[in-house]
Each structure stands twice: as C-alpha cells, then as structure tokens.
C-alpha cells in the first residue's frame, strides 16, 4: 500500500464539514428551546403552586425539590419526543418542541391543581415542609406520568 492510497482512504466526503455545522447548529437551537421551555415550566409551576417554589428549592426543602425535579424531568420527556418526532426537519422540530412544550406546561399545571383538589392534598403546606412527606412522591409521580402521556401523544 503506498502513501497516496492511505490518504485517499482517510479523506472525508466533501459535505462533511457543512453537515457537522448544521448538526451543531441544530443541537444549539434545540438546547436553547429546551432551556427556555424548562425555565417557563419551572416558573409556571412556581407561579401556580402555593409558596415560593424557587426559594424552597434553594433552601433544600425536600418535597419542593422532589416535585420540581419531577416537573423538569417530565418537561424534558415532552421536549425530547417532540424533537424526535420532527424526523430531522429542524424548523418543524423546533416549532413542535415549542408548541408541545407549552401544551405540556399547561397540562401539568392544570393536572397538579386537579390532583390537589381530588386528593385534598395541601401542596403549599406539603412543599414548604422541611421534612420528607410521602405525598410529595404522589405529586412527583403525577408530573412524570403526565409528561409521559403528553410525550406519547406527540409521537
């Protein structure tokens, strides 16, 4: 094997650089959309939940941390499926992620309020407690379950 054959075997396709550039750009755009939706989702939960959720999370209130973490995971599930379902079309994927992400936020907020009403849970008191309350797992599970339902509905 001579030196010329080795070099030609290692050569990249002419469009490789632009494909990498498009891929990196898509990752960055999806990351921004995902981050925006997660922040909006956090503040939607914070705004509609009795007490100051962000302050409770910062102070380490265990139930607030559990409920918030579950809300963020469920939001990520919705965003991931919206991106995956876009079949590689960047503009449709970004728009789908935004639309379904906002729908997911609304559904989660309404469902948690409904859960609070049905179960007679005082979520405000629950998340403000500095002691772990098993009921916080029920609220967290509702977040994740709804995230799964919305995610599957997208696909």
Image (tube, rainbow, N blue to C red):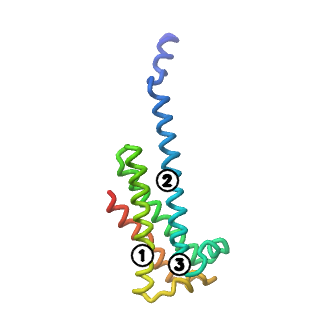
**Label 3 Cα neighbours within 10 Å, binned few <14 / some 14-19 / many ≥20:** some
Quadrant of the image containing the C terminus? bottom left
Marked residue nearer the N-terminal end (2 or 3): 2
Q: Residue at position x 44%, y 24% from top?
A: 13
- Image position, residue 122 (x, y; %): 51, 87
- Residue at mark 2 to residue at mark 3: CA–CA distance: 24 Å
Label 3 near label 2: C-beta < 8 Å?
Answer: no
Q: Residues within 10 Å of mark 2 (few under 14, many from 20)?
A: some
C-alpha span from label 1 to label 2: 22 Å
Residue at 41% in and 44% down? 90
**Residue tagged 1:** 110
Return the x and y of residue 142 as percentages of the image width and height: 43, 75
Helix, strand or loop at label 3? It is loop
Judge the density around disc 1: few (<14), some (14-19), many (≥20) Cα neighbours within 10 Å.
some
Residue at (52, 83) in percent of width and height: 123
Considering every residue shown, the one lying at the far bottom of the view is 120
Asked whether the residues under the numbered discs 1 and 2 touch, taking CB atoms below 8 Å apart as contact, a structural biologist would say no
Asked whether the residues under the numbered discs 3 and 1 touch, taking CB atoms below 8 Å apart as contact, a structural biologist would say no
N-terminal of the pair, mark 3 or mark 1, is 3
Task: Find residue 79 and report its image quarter.
Answer: bottom left
> Which disc, if any, is residue 33?
2
Residue drawn at 55 percent across, 68 percent down = 43
Q: Which numbered tag is attached to residue 49?
A: 3
Callout 2: helix, strand or loop? Answer: helix
Quarter occupied by residue 130: bottom right
- Is residue 22 shown left or right of residue 88? right
Q: Earlier in the sequence, mark 1 or mark 2?
A: 2
């Amino acid at each position: 094997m001579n030196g010329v054959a080795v070099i030609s075997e290692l050569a990249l396709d002419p469009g490789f650089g632009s494909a990498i550039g498009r891929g990196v750009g898509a990752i960055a755009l999806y990351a921004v959309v995902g981050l925006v939706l997660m922040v909006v989702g956090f503040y939607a939960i914070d705004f509609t939940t009795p007490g100051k959720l962000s302050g409770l999370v910062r102070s380490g209130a265990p139930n607030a941390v559990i409920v918030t973490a579950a809300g963020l995971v469920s939001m990520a599930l919705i965003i991931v499926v919206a991106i995956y379902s876009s079949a590689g079309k960047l503009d449709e994927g970004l728009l789908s992620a935004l639309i379904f992400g906002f729908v997911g936020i609304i559904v989660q907020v309404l469902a948690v309020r409904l859960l609070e009403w049905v179960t007679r849970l005082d979520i405000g008191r629950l998340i403000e407690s500095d002691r772990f309350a098993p009921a916080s797992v029920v609220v967290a599970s509702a977040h994740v379950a709804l995230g799964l339902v919305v995610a599957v509905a997208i696909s």
